[in-house]
Image (cartoon, rainbow, N blue to C red):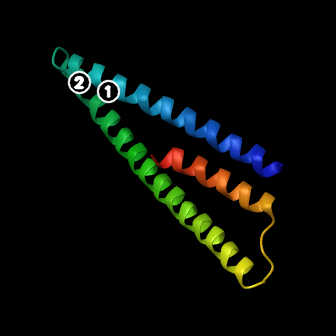
Amino acid sequence: MNVVKENNNVFNIEAQIDAKLKLLKDNYKKIMEEVKDNEYLVDVLKDYEKYMGTLLEDDKREKEAFELLDRHISNLLEESKTNTKQNKTPMTKQDVDFLKKERSEINKIIK
């Protein structure tokens, strides 16, 4: 059950990151408008652009990592089917169900 608890923590962190990214985007739009009236905000705008770029790069790397996990889980599930057919030690139904659930959660994040 520790895996489930850790999994929930990951999803909570993901939600927090998404909320902060949305806030940054909203603030960026406001600053873009205010820069037109106040030239001193140009540096603030540049800082926001740099920070948002970093966050978007991190988001891209995270998505790639989740896609890698998805492929790995898919391979494990396929291997389990093959092992069952070849009378090798198959995964338990619990293991398969757990992997399917994890894969479903990962796909929600990726999309």
The picture places residue 107, in percent across and down from the top left corner, at 52, 50
Residue 108 percent across, percent down from the top left: 53, 44
Give residue 6's position: percent from left, percent from top: 74, 47
Q: Is residue 70 above or below residue 30?
A: below
User: In percent of the image, x 73 and y 55: which residue is there?
Assistant: 98
Q: Amino acid at mark 2?
A: Met
Please tell me the numbered disc located at residue 32: 2
Q: Residue drawn at (33%, 41%), measured in percent from left and top?
A: 50
**Vertical order, 78 against 30 (above or below):** below
Residue at the outermost right position: 1
Rendered position, 38 above or below 88: above
Question: What SS does tag 2 mark?
Answer: helix
Q: Which residue is mark 1?
A: 28
Instruction: Work out which residue is located at the far front of the displayed protein and give it.
Output: 85
Q: Outermost residue toward the left?
A: 36
Alpha carbons under labels 2 and 1: distance apart: 6 Å
Query: In the drawing, what numbered circle is on residue 18?
Result: none
Image side of residue 12 versus residue 67, left or right: right
Could you tell me which residue is drawn at 69 percent across and 41 percent down? 9
